[in-house]
Structures are given as C-alpha cells and as structure tokens.
Image (cartoon, coloured by chain):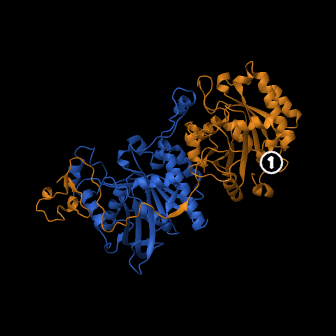
Amino acid sequence: MDGKCTKTDCTVAATGKCLLLHARPEDCPNYAAETNAPTILQESKAVTETAVDEDIGRRFHTGSELGTDDASELMRAEYATLIAVLGQYDVGKTCLLSSLYLLATCAALGTEIEFAGSLTLAGFEARARRLRQWKDGSLPKQMVDHTILADERAPALMHIAFREREHERRRFQILVTDLPGEWSRELIEDAAVASRFAFLHRADGIVLTLDGPRFASTLRHVEINNANLLLSRLASTIGVDKSIPLVLLVSKADELSLEVPASIEKVEAYAASLGFKPKVIAVAAISRDSGKAQSGTGVLELIEYFLDRHQEPGRLAVTEPPHSGERYFQQVR
Amino acid sequence: MNMPNDEKIMAAVVLIGGPDSGKTNFIIRLWLAIRGNAGGIKQDGLPDRLEYLQSGGQKLLSGEFVGHTAHDVYNETIIPCLVTRKGKSEKGHLIVPDCSGERWMSIYNKREWSTQWEEHFSENTGCLIFIRATSDQIISPLDWVQCERLWGGAVAPNDGEKYSTPTQVVITEWLQFIRSAFVKKIGNRVLPRVGIVVAAWDRVPQESKTSGPMAYIAQEFPLLAQFIRANDDIFDFAVFGTSIAGGDFDHEPGFKEKCLGQNDPLENGYVVHELLGSLRQTSDLTLPVTWAMGVDFKLGDA
C-alpha cells in the first residue's frame, strides 16, 4: 500500500488499519495515495509536542562580533591577545580578517597551530562573503558593549582561538578589532576622537594597514603623509605604549608580486623616530592573481609575530608583559 | 518529560543534526538493537509508549528507511534498560530526545534553545551529532576560489539573500553552545561527551572508508576536525561511522531483497570506530549511545 492518512492519529500507513474503520483504506476520504513519496514518521501519542513559541532556556553568543563587554568576559576567563587593526577605508582590513578565517576553514594554518574555536564564526562567514558591510551614513562613535543578533555591523571585535598541535599545546585567544576606515581618517583630522581608541592601551599588537599599490603609485606622497599623521596621533595624542609591537602591513601585495614599495621605508623610519619598533609585512590576503601570490600570504606571519610563541631573541618586550595580572582584567574600553 | 515515577534516569543522550542527517533512522535502529539484547545496552521491559518506535521499526524491518521528521515533532524516546558501569549491572531509563533537523538549524540561527533542551543537559548527558555521508543537505565550506572571485569582482556578493551556512560551521557552533551550557550549568569538572556520527557510512567511498571516520571528517569538514583535535581537553570526543543495514535499501540494486531474505533484515548493520586507537568495526549498533552514556561498552569484532 502506498499512501498515508491526513487524519491525526491514524496509523494506517504503518498498520493498514483505518481509524474510521473503512474496510479499504483507499475508501477513506482522508486517505491520500502516494508513490515514491518519503515516509513521514507518524506522530504518536508518546510524542511530546512543543508550542511554536517556546520558553527560552539559554541564549548564546550572537556570533557576529563581540562587544567590549563580551570581550571582557572572555578576557577574564583567559588571556586574550588583542590586535588593533587600523587603516583608511578600503585598504584591506576586512580582507585581512576574511583571509585569516579562510586559512582556518581550509586547515591552512601550517603545521604548528590549528583552529580551536571562534565566538564570531557567523561574522567571519558574512565578512568573507562580503555580506556584512558598514552601513552608509553615521557610524557608531565608540565600540559597542554588546552585540545583538539583528544589529548592523558595528565597531567591535572578532574572535578566533588557536591551539598548538604539539609540545605544550598552548591555547591562544585572539581578538582582532573590526573598525571602519573612517575612524582612522577622523583620528587624523580631529584629536577629539582619540577617546575611541582607548582600547589601544590594552592592545598586544597594532597593525597599520597601508595600501600597497597606492604606495607604489603617484599617490604615495599622500599615503606617506596620512600614515605618518596617524602614527603621530598614536604616539602623541593617544600616547600608546611604544613597546607594543607595531606592524606596517603592506596590503594587496599580490598586485606588487610581494615586493614592498620603497616608499614604505619612509613610514618605517618615521615610526622608528617616534619610538616604535616597526616590522613590515607584505600581505596578499585574498589574491587577485594567484600567479603572483597565493591568497593568505603574510597573514600567518602577522599572527605569529604577535603571538611570539617562540620568544625570539631581540624582540622588544612589551613594557607591561602579556599574561601579567593586571592585563587580564584591564578593560578594553 | 513523561517519566514513570520512582524510575531512575540513567542518562540522556541528545541527538543533534540538521535535516537528513540520519538521527531518526538511528533511534529506530538503536531500539531494534536494544531489543536484540546483543549489545552494550539490554532491554529491561518495554517502554510505556511505543508507537513512534514501532512505526519506525516496521519501516526498517520492511527494508525502508524512515523519512523526514516533520518540523514540529519533538520526541522523547524513553527506554528502560540494563547497562554495565564499571563492571556492575545498572538499571534505569535512557532518554533519547529527538527533533527535526530544522529545529536544530533554528537553534543555530536564533542562537538560543528552549527550556526543554536546557533541562536535558546535566552530568548524565551525552550528545551525538549526526552527519549523513553524501547527503545533499551538506553545505560545503567556503573556499579560496570562491573568495577570490568574490573579492576580485568576478561575482557579486549575494547581497540581500540568505546564504547557506557551511555544515562544518553550524556543527562547530553547536559544539560551542554545548560547551557553554555545560560550563555554566555544571562547571569544568565534567567534560561533555560528544560523539560525531557519520551516518550511512556504507555510502562513503571505499578509499575514505579505510582511513576511518575521523579522517573522513578531516577531509570533508576541516574546520570541525581541527576543533575536535584542539579541544580534546575540554570535550570527550569520539567519532563513529554507522550503517543501519550494511547497505542502501534505496540505491543499491538487489540489496533490499537480499536483506528481506535474511533471518534479520538488519543483521549486516555496523558501527566503525577508533576507540582503541585503530579502526575497528562492530555489529553493536548501541555502541555510540553506550559510549555517550559513559557506561561500559563492548568493543571489537574486528
């Protein structure tokens, strides 16, 4: 027999017996003949049905971004390496985040570390698909405290955890800022916005993202000027600790065949003159020409530089070392 | 939860999985295996309510897989059983809550679950997460080629339309939800027991079968595989491959007829595992549940 009954509680499909006692199930007005239709397991009286609107037993992380309070909760439980990524609009900050995520999803984090979790998986997915965009118009002026599921993209933090595959098998919680390029521009233009960047005092690393192709073009003079102004703001207006590792990230390096433009040296020298110890890393986060550079080039080097797992000699130690008691509880904002 | 009075709840084993992941067929097969009394869980009387198990059992015994569970169905299979824990026999009730795969996807999308699910999580709870091999509901991970095309402008972002979250991302989030619930309810003293079950193992390509279920997960779901390896200190993980009948009633010519000609149409069902450190196969279909309950389980056949 191929058919089912639409009447609740009738088990004719399993037993062959019509609840309304029709001698032939096919004679029942509720019976519907089916061929090759999937058998849907009939509900039994033992099934406990739930109302459509259920009481909420537990809410979990939103998955899109972490607000500063959300991040602080994480940081109280375990030390988190906070990496601040700065840079103007369209220099490749989101591309960097997406590339980091792709390295994890494709198990391309090398042989020493592997993905151990993320409280912002959905946010990474959306960014990698270019779906989580900044809303046109006015942007929040501070990092958000908490994120709510339906929120538009807001200045906040992305989270990812790695763990060493061998030896000590240390776990590293990493928070990376997700900030609009407008913030960097506004900081250059107006010292009054410096308070938004208070989190930099807690940062374990600062990335100044520089548009590689622009530094190799006639626009380089403007770019050098802007980068140096931003560095001055960091040093003087905000007063970040100069011992915090600073990376000058040369983005879109696939378009340059991974060659760092000579003009970057001027920014590097200026940063050094302010007291920073800058490191230059060329990154091809998502390559437009895999023949010139593979996607993800430089991203792992960036992360490993900040994690400093091997405690390389000659690295300038942060004045207030990571994992010190105070830094566990230091608020992000 | 409709529990008989004075009866001990031995364990709850929560089945988790998206649509078409194989949960319901496994529950029915589990029931038939318990009825057979040859595995790690033995029957200790009949459940008070049997219609759900009976209806599904008749399907499997007729050489038909049970189809899709309706969206609004929530079922608690409560089975009185006998197990062995540290060499001692123990009686009680095993609860296996089950709902449609759509409900678990809703939990992922809404980032919350009901009080009903919350109540199931205790020290005596184990979880089994199901993925059905070759299911067309599995969503592949984002890859570099897709990203390069998106970011390079070759294709426009799928703006305004919902995209399907890769299966490995959804499962990783479920695991993070489970961990969060355990830590907040019970603390860190108990590691959540979570089995990953690759259902329809018989449909996995032969070259993948010989590498075992964990290697299959690593190949198909690399993010999930990393999460499992990296979090072996905060979860108790195991990975299984299961085959309800040892083959496919629907797509393997002659298989159904062959099974129906046997004494037990399902006698060729099996579980593969690596609980002893190497790939093994057993005919005990209760093994994933026995393991998830934290009681003694039988190993081997080969």
- Residue A119 coordinates in the image, percent (x, y): 60, 51
Q: Residue at x 33, y 53 (%)?
A: B68
Identify the residue at the far left of this view.
A23
Asked if residue A64 can be seen in this view, the reply is yes
In the figure, the blue chain has which letter? B
Q: Is residue B272 above or below residue B252?
A: below
- Residue A25 coordinates in the image, percent (x, y): 15, 58
Q: Residue at x 70, y 36 (%)?
A: A181
**Can you identify the residue that label 1 sits on?**
A201
Label 1 resides on the chain identified as A
Callout 1 secondary element: helix
Identify the residue at the far top of this view.
A218
Asked if residue B261 can be seen in this view, the reply is no
- Residue A217 coordinates in the image, percent (x, y): 73, 19
- Amino acid type assigned to the residue bearing label 1 in the image: His
Q: Nearer the viewer, residue B244 or A159?
A: A159
- Residue B92 coordinates in the image, percent (x, y): 41, 75
**Is A146 displayed left or right of B204 in the figure?**
right
Q: Residues within 10 Å of mark 1 (few under 14, many from 20)?
A: some
Q: Is residue A239 above or below residue A29?
A: above
In the figure, the orange chain has which letter? A
**Is B234 displayed left or right of B125 in the figure?**
right
Q: Considering the image in quadrants, where does the N terminus of chain B appear?
A: bottom left
**Is A139 displayed left or right of A4 in the figure?**
right
